[in-house]
Image (tube, rainbow, N blue to C red):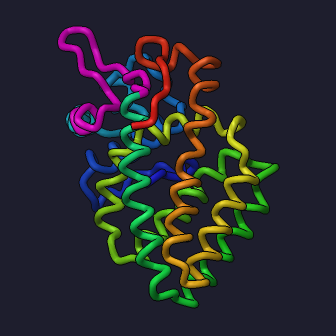
Amino acid sequence: MLLDLNDWRLNPRKAVAPQLRVILRSRIVRNQLKPSSRLSESDLAKEYQVSRQPVREAFITLEHEGLLEIRPQRGTFVKPIDVNSVLGGRFVREAFEADVVHNLAQTPDTSLIKELRSQLKEQAAIADVNPAKFIELDEVFHETLAIAAGIEQAWGYLEAVKAQMDRVRFISFVEFPIHTLIAQHGQIVDKIEEGDADAAERSMRRHLKEILNSLPRIQQLYPQYFAGGGGKVNDP
């Protein structure tokens, strides 16, 4: 889940550490907390008006997800983006979502198609005025497909796998051909509505390979954000 950072308020009736994990993950993915930057438990505890313990717990979870590195006696740092993790996450995501749309197209649901068409209109409306917002809407689009397929829990597992891919997407939203991506979304919806499962699957696979076209240029423009200064892109 990508949190709307305009509203980061904690819910006092819920456990604090998981909420902080979502907030900090969103800030890392959105590049607000930049690769290699040092994070302070005490500063974040003060910022969110909590004790240091839930911040520490959130740090540990995010370290397990590959987004932070905790160095004893030195501090906690945002990990640079690992290209292999980007490519691996994209590979897993393609396999997962290709199967999702294949299944949905076998029994098209009119209410789902209506919802997806509405989302496409919203995406088109903000594409030229707020490209970063498009990525949030893109996330909603893909999550809607997973929920419709009845595998929302699996989408939650995928979230951690695709974290590095999401970081690249936020850094590079200017480089992504947003109108092309929206058109690809439309093609996916068309094939689901037509009940063409194989074509829906092909459309999704083509859509999720788009990042491979942008990644080399992003590495060239922002080498400091990548582990080892970047590397050659080879799709698994």
Residue at the front extreme, as displayed = 198
> Considering the image in quadrants, where does the C terminus appear?
top left
180 magenta-colored: no
Foreground residue among 74 and 11: 74
In the image, residue 159 lies at what x, y percent?
37, 51
Residue nearer the viewer, 18 or 119:
119
Counting labels gives 0
Q: In which quadrant of the rendered view does residue 146 lie?
A: bottom left
Rendering coords of residue 33 (x, y %): 48, 28
| Left or right of residue 72: residue 183 | right
Q: Which residue lies furthest to the top in this view?
A: 74
Quarter of the figure that contains the N terminus: bottom left
Name the side, left or right, on which 40 lies relative to 117.
Answer: left
- Vertical relation: 48 (above or below) 219: below
Image location (x, y in percent) of residue 58: 27, 38
Residue 74 covered by magenta stretch: yes
Residue in the foreground of this view, choosing between 38 and 54: 38
**192 up-or-down from 165: above or below:** below
Image: 169 above or below 19: above
- Which residue corresponds to the image point at 61% horizontal and 84% vertical from the top-left? 194
Q: Which residue is drawn at 29% across and 66% down?
A: 153
From the top left corner, tell me how far across and down residue 59 is, in percent: 27, 32
* Residue lying at 34% horizontally and 45% vertically, measured from the top left: 161
Q: Residue at x 28, y 61 (%)?
A: 13
Range drawn in magenta: 60-83
Lateral position of residue 235 relative to residue 214, left or right: left
16 sits to left or right of 212: left
Examine the rendered structure and indicate whether residue 203 appears above or below residue 18: below
